[in-house]
Amino acid sequence: MANQLLDDRFFERLSAEAETLASGEVRAPSRLKSKIYSGLVRRQAQSGPLLSLSQTEAAGHPLCVFERLLGGSPVGEKAKSFNPCRVCHARLLAERIEAAPIFWRHCPYVDFQRR
């Protein structure tokens, strides 16, 4: 019963937000974008190793502060292939809070919060 009430409130709020968009463009909630992104990266990691952080940066993709910290540490390339987003508090906040209070550069979860 409580879950149904929470679901109803969520969809009512979502509907109200969609109606108030001036441009008429409906955007997916940032929480949903975050959950989808996390799921895609998790599936990608299950199918094989991810690029190491050094390879990712060399390919022209910027690293967030935590990836940069791990990338600069004296560990092997295998450890640098670990996805630090899996344990990052930005992911947890972004998946649970719309307009989450996260602000660092080059974090995909921060990008999802922008409207």
Image (cartoon, rainbow, N blue to C red):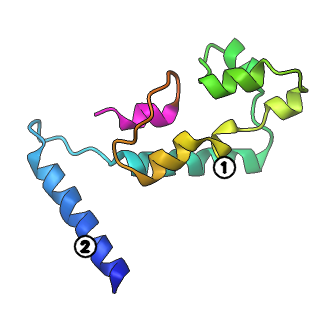
**Main SS type for the magenta part?**
helix
Dot 1 crowding, Cα within 10 Å, few <14, some 14–19, many 20+ = some
Mark 1: amino acid: Arg
**Residue at x 59% of width, y 17% of height:** 62
Mark 1 or mark 2: which is in front?
Answer: 2
The label number, if any, that marks residue 27 in the structure image: none
**Residue type (three-letter) at the residue carrying disc 2:** Asp
Q: Quadrant of residue 84?
A: top right
> Which residue is at 37% across, 45% downward?
30
- The residue shown at (52%, 29%) is 107
Disc with the residue nearer the chain's start (1 vs 2): 2
Task: Give the percent coordinates (x, y) of residue 91.
Answer: 54, 44
According to the image, label 1 marks what residue? 42
**In this picture, which residue range is highlighted in magenta?**
108-115
Q: At 10% across and 51% down in the image, what residue appears?
A: 19
Label 1: state its secondary structure: helix
- Secondary structure of the residue carrying numbered label 2: helix
Residue at the limit of the structure toward the bottom, as seen here: 1
Dots 1, 2 in contact, CB < 8 A: no
- How far across and down, in percent of the image, does residue 2 sit? 34, 81
Q: Quadrant of the C terminus?
A: top left
Disc 2 marks which residue?
8
| Residue 26, quarter of the rendered image | top left
Taking the magenta stretch, the answer to whether it contains residue 56 is no
Measured in 3D between alpha carbons, the distance from the residue under mark 1 to the one under mark 2, in whole angstroms, is 29 Å
Q: Position of residue 112 (x, y in %)?
A: 40, 37
Was residue 114 drawn as part of the magenta stretch in this picture? yes
Give whichever of 98, 32 is nearer the camera: 98
Residue count near mark 2 (Cα–Cα under 10 Å), binned few <14, some 14–19, many ≥20: few
**Relative vertical location of residue 22 with respect to residue 20 in this rendering, above or below:** above
Q: Answer with left or right where residue 42 lies relative to residue 47.
A: left
